Amino acid sequence: MRSTSSKPARAGALAAALFVLATACTTTSSGSSGGDGKHVTYWSMWTQTEPQAKVLQKSIDAFTAKTGIHVDVQWQGRKVLDKVAPALLSGNAPDLVDQGFDRLLPALAANGKAQDLSSVLAMDTGEGRKVGEVLPAKFLDVLPKGKDGTPWMIPYESVSVSLFYNGKDPLVSQPPKTWDDLLAVCTAAKAAGKACIGTDGDQGWASQYWFDYLLNRNGGSVATLAADRTGAAFKDPAVLKSAQQVEQLVKEGYLTKGYDATKYPEQQNHWATGESVFFLMGSWLPSETEKFRDPGFEVRSVAFPTTGDATRNAVDFLPLGFTIPKGAKNADAAGRFIAFVLQKDQLSGFSTEAKNIAPRTEIPAPAELADVAKQLKDQPSRLPDDNADADWQDKILVAQYDKLWLGKTDAAGFVDQAGKASAAYWTAKG
């Protein structure tokens, strides 16, 4: 299961691709907390059999044993937030929910329905350090603030988008740091009769990562394009340059042969068997392709290449984490639970057992994600697509970009048509 929302590219939906997930909702306990401070009602995005749920259940048990506070958890699954809205209206909001930032932001934070978590950031994790001290400031700073300008989310898992490759592929003697480096590998791969870039033609949200990163490297911003109601922002030279670089990949034949007629996960599986050199995808890729890789396949990754200015090297940060809804009856107890989970011993399970990346950068990542974790630690952070309007991305950017990626238009055509489509979109919105 790959998507849970209209745009799988955002973190809450990306989380659905971390593992092959069950779609059913499993509940282990129910009922409302009574506001006595001795119970926390927690609605989770995970299903009970998933590794993250098992890690969290261990923390729940340990927290209850230590504090006497019972955490009544409901493993709701990916559509957990669909149930939170009516619960808020009825006055039966859970004390705690989790999801990706992209889902929590529009559902709660942007509407003023998420509590200010400043006090939680100031809580001691139990290690003599505050929550706000164990989490890198750059991770917290990149998250958009709530309606009242306050923090509303505490991450417990980090996802990123990186350029994956086989470390034993002779075509990649050095991971490409610049766009020219990447093109050199692609040229060599083409000469050797091998595809340079794997991609499934039906996954426009994923192939659009190429344009998003290129635009960022060239000094532009998807958020700027989305916010301009006239469509004129598409005339920014950085947009045309980025589109031309994408066009080059298509016209030079650097993409997997027949990609325009394949469907997920065909090409990423082919990448895992060595049919292409690179695959630009989220950090769930190693988990999804594990059963297809040869024993000698060494999963490595490199941050998206720079295109000129070496300081434009930010990597995508897509956090999953906790939010306390307004109306929570046991907010203080919920905050104590969050602080407990942020302990190193508790958070380490997201790496050792769930095989993902913990936001505390001193916690080692799984071997296959070690490169991604280092990128997150050492390089600036950004939100994918600059956290641009989701509906606009789906209906305008991805729809128009697909034509470019599939070779149905050129860079100039993309710029022209996307600008017009964007203007028409906002006109229709009124």
Image (spheres, rainbow, N blue to C red):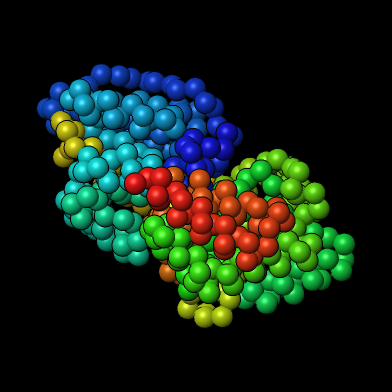
Q: Is residue 95 above or below residue 153?
A: above
Q: Is residue 251 left or right of residue 128?
A: right
Q: Residue at x 33, y 20 (%)?
A: 29
Q: Position of residue 110 (x, y in %)?
A: 27, 46
Image spot of residue 160 (x, y percent): 50, 55
The correct choice, above or below, for 87 with respect to 6 in the image is above
Q: Which residue shows up at 21% across the image and 26% down it?
A: 89
Residue 130 is drawn in which quadrant? bottom left
Which of these two is toward me, 422 or 200?
A: 422
Depth order, front residue of 371/381 = 381
What is the quadrant of the N terminus in the image? top right
- Can residue 52 be seen? yes
Nearest the viewer among 356 and 55 is 356
Q: Furthest-left residue in view?
A: 36
- The image shows residue 156, relative to residue 31, as above or below, that is below
Residue at 37% across, 20% down: 28
Is residue 68 among the parts visible in the rendering?
Answer: no
Q: Is residue 87 above or below residue 156?
A: above
Q: Residue at x 35, y 39 (%)?
A: 98
